[in-house]
Amino acid sequence: MQLGINDRSAQVEQVFTALNLSLGQQLQQRSSQYYQATHPNYRTHPKAVFKGDMPTRTRMLSGSHSAQFAGRLIGGCADTLFPLLCSSLLDLKQWRAHHNQGVILYLENAELSPAQFARGLLAVRATGGLESLSGIILGRSLCLGQGDFSYHNALDYALQGVACPVVIDADIGHVAPNWVMINGADTECEFKQGELSLVQHYR
């Protein structure tokens, strides 16, 4: 919905770069400087354009200042994927065993409350789906929660002790701007000084 006719922001237009890639080429993306905290109503304002109004603060869940990881990129909207990740339909543990290749799991949240998101992560973790991942990338959430259990509390609770790097509040999901995430792409990630860079290879 961000592909409005009047929108010329670099983050929005990068989807056309991805669609024009050829075999052997790569897509490079870096953290935005600002994200859009308000969500425009495209039904009443179909020509709305991206307007970053809050500083982007991508960070590591562990508090680390740097990390590098690589693998096949697999993921999407957690609302849809949690049931699949807890079944044989999207068994990351079996996939890694068969292909002998690392996996970067990326997830974003549309409508799940922090408690629901935590339960989903714990369910996937109980099946072994978070074992031996190269890394996890989590986007900003529309449902930040209120009171004593926020979205970030949910991540701390559900992912405590996970062995791989976990990057949170990345530029993916229902809070603009959004990276182009190509499922199955060989991907290299680097987090350094509050910025995440992503290189996806067409191979």
Image (cartoon, rainbow, N blue to C red):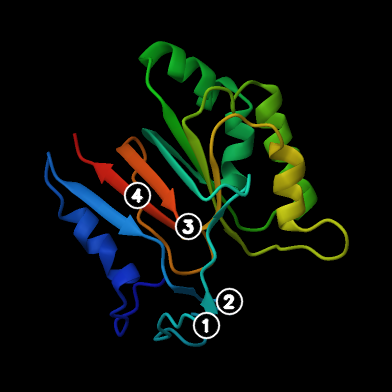
Tell me the kind of residue under disc 2.
Ala
Q: Is residue 21 left or right of residue 160?
A: left
- Give the mark nearest the N terminus, 3 or 4: 3
- Give the mark nearest the N terminus, 4 or 1: 1
Tell me the kind of residue under disc 1.
Asp
State the residue at coordinates (20%, 60%): 17
Q: Is residue 71 left or right of residue 200?
A: right
- Give the mark nearest the N terminus, 1 or 3: 1
Tell me the kind of residue under disc 4.
Leu
Residue ranking furthest to the top? 98
Q: Quadrant of residue 78?
A: top right
* Percent of width and height locating residue 150: 78, 58
Q: Quadrant of residue 145?
A: bottom right
Say above or below: 176 vs 98.
Answer: below
Q: Which residue is mark 1?
A: 53
* Percent of width and height locating residue 201: 23, 41
- Give the mark nearest the N terminus, 2 or 3: 2
Mark 3, Cα crowd under 10 Å, few <14 / some 14-19 / many 20+, is many
- Give 15 or 195, whichever is nearer the viewer: 195
* Percent of width and height locating residue 96: 44, 18
Q: Quadrant of the C terminus?
A: top left
Secondary element at image label 1: loop
Q: Which residue is mark 2?
A: 37
- Give 42 or 148, whichever is nearer the viewer: 148
Q: Are marks 3 and 4 in contact (CB under 8 Å)?
A: no
Count the marks.
Answer: 4
Q: Which mark is residue 172?
A: 3
State the residue at coordinates (64%, 27%): 86
Q: Nearer the viewer, mark 2 or mark 4?
A: 4
